[in-house]
Image (cartoon, rainbow, N blue to C red):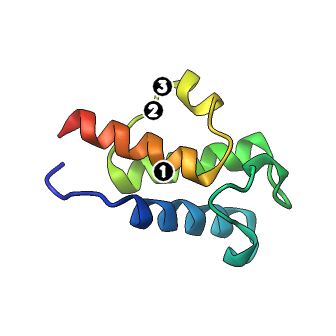
Amino acid sequence: MTMSLQESAVLDEVRAQTAKELGIDLSEIADETVLKELPGADSVRLLRVVAQIERVYDVEFEDEDIFDVRTPRQLATLVLAQAGAEA
């Protein structure tokens, strides 16, 4: 990956994708919001968010890493770590 990713941009994308998938307002999702507690959240919908983030950033996460993610910030950190590992 040639571009440098900034945490704030990745975090904004994670929040935007989550809001889009769950059909809720972006303002309902803070950086530290527990994803599974959001309205309409279930494992299938949250996995769709993860899959979309993987496509956007051209990364692939290990299943065990995904199961540890609870907040948008944790998912953004995972993206940055993965993108950094591939750089």
Q: Find residue 2 and name its label.
A: none
- Residue at the spot of label 3: 62
**For the residue carrying disc 3, how many other residues have a C-alpha within 10 Å: few (<14), some (14-19), or many (20+)?**
few
The amino acid sitting under disc 1 is: Ala
User: Which mark is in front, 2 or 1?
Assistant: 1
Residue at horizontal 76 percent and vertical 71 percent from the top: 28
Cα separation, mark 2 vs mark 1, equals: 12 Å
Do the numbered discs 3 and 2 sit on residues whose CB atoms are within 8 Å?
Answer: yes
Q: Image height check: is 5 above or below 67?
A: below
Q: Position of residue 18 (x, y in %)?
A: 64, 61
Task: Specify the label residue 61 is tagged with.
Answer: 2
Q: Is residue 58 left or right of residue 63?
A: left
The amino acid pointed to by label 2 is: Phe
Give the labeled residue for mark 1.
76
Is mark 2 in CB contact (under 8 Å) with mark 1?
Answer: no
Q: Kindly state the secondary structure of the residue where label 3 is placed.
A: loop
